[in-house]
Amino acid sequence: MSIRSPIRILLITLILIFSGLALWLGGQIVTTLKAPRVPVLLYHHLTVEDNLPSGCKYFTPQKVFADEMQYLHANGYQVIPLRQLIEYMEFGGDLPEKPMVLTFDDGYESNYTLAYPVLQQYQMPATIFLEVSKAGMHDPKDIPRLSWEQMREMEESGLIEIQAHTYDLHQKVTVDPALSQTQPAVIARAYLRPEQRRETPAEYENKLLKDFIQARETIEENLSPRRDILCWPYGAYNTDALRLAHQAGFKYFVTCRTGMNQYRDSTGCIRRISVEGEIPLDRFIQLIEPDYSLVRQARQIGARYLNWALEWYIK
């Protein structure tokens, strides 16, 4: 047997491996190209003011919101519940033409007084992610929050679902003795000033687990069971937070990562598109249009398998 034979066999093997990978990647791209892309829109607080002062990027004038919903209705977009999207991402199946999902973060009273009448007009479902500890608060220094009575009324209509935005972790904590650096509470061990030290890893994990359980149980006690979707404050999370949230009973996770969602994408990393503020309607239309570029497809596939690997790791 000549020395060329093992080299030839190795080359043939490598060619077959890379050909197989190319075919697999091509199949993934074709599947991704064909699969519907579902935008999940993100709002926070609505206001009756038409001209917003600077620094109110999370505020949306009601007229702007109403115009956006009217555009969706008039142009054939079908707003579906977030849970229907989750089921599609996990199991596939049929979706309506031009599917769309609406979400609101924090649980402001304006979701009931200003957004809900528009959603009723067009019969559009939405999910509200509630900062549970602030439910019913009307602190003069803060924007009024939803009451449990308002939430019950909206849920009973069949249009609105209330899910968790943690109990009291939607805040940033200081992490250094000088109190000059802050990070989202979900991913940071806080600096305990009276004790002049940071939280231990055990204290940090206990804080998260207690909060996640309290968020889920409080909503279930005031509304009904099946609170299994968690929205990360600031979109920030890590492997510890994800593991503990699963332990607390959450199955699905909503982020602030920009992008659309497809079949086989991870329900542990549901992407959203912020359409908040006083943006022109043409800009809104651009944001909700799918990106069919090959670069976008490659990124979508890469993120899909990275998220699967992360979920396998924490389990």
Image (spheres, grey):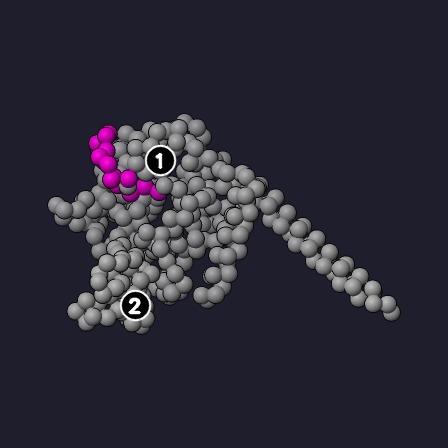
Q: Which of 166 and 188 is in front in this view?
A: 188
Quadrant housing the N terminus: bottom right
For mark 1, give the secondary structure.
loop
Q: Where is residue 230 in the image (x, y as percent from the top left)?
A: 35, 55
- Residue 49 belongs to the span the image colors magenta: yes
For mark 2, give the secondary structure.
helix
Specify few, some or many for label 1: CA neighbours under 10 Å numbering under 14, 14-19, or 20 or more: some
The magenta region covers 42-57
Height in image: 63 above or below 266? Answer: above
Prevailing secondary structure of the magenta residues: loop
Height in image: 293 above or below 282? Answer: below
Report whether 19 appears left or right of 288.
Answer: right
In the picture of the structure, the residue carrying the numbered disc 1 is: 123
- Residue 59 belongs to the span the image colors magenta: no
Residue at the (51%, 61%) spot, across then down: 309
Q: Which of 297 and 176 is in front in this view?
A: 176
Residue at the (21%, 67%) spot, across then down: 192
First reached walking from the N terminus: tag 1 or tag 2: 1
In the picture of the structure, the residue carrying the numbered disc 2 is: 204
Instruction: Measure the alpha-carbon separation of dots 1 and 2.
Output: 42 Å
Specify few, some or many for label 2: CA neighbours under 10 Å numbering under 14, 14-19, or 20 or more: some
For the residue marked with disc 2, what is the amino acid?
A: Tyr
How many numbered markers are drawn? Answer: 2
Residue at the (78%, 64%) spot, across then down: 7
Q: Is residue 84 visible?
A: no
Q: Nearer the viewer, mark 1 or mark 2?
A: 2
Q: Is residue 109 visible?
A: yes
Q: Where is residue 186 in the image (x, y as percent from the top left)?
A: 31, 60
Q: Nearer the viewer, residue 129 or 43?
A: 43
Q: Position of residue 287 (x, y in %)?
A: 42, 36
Residue at the (32%, 41%) spot, across then down: 43
Tag 1–tag 2 contact (CB < 8 Å):
no
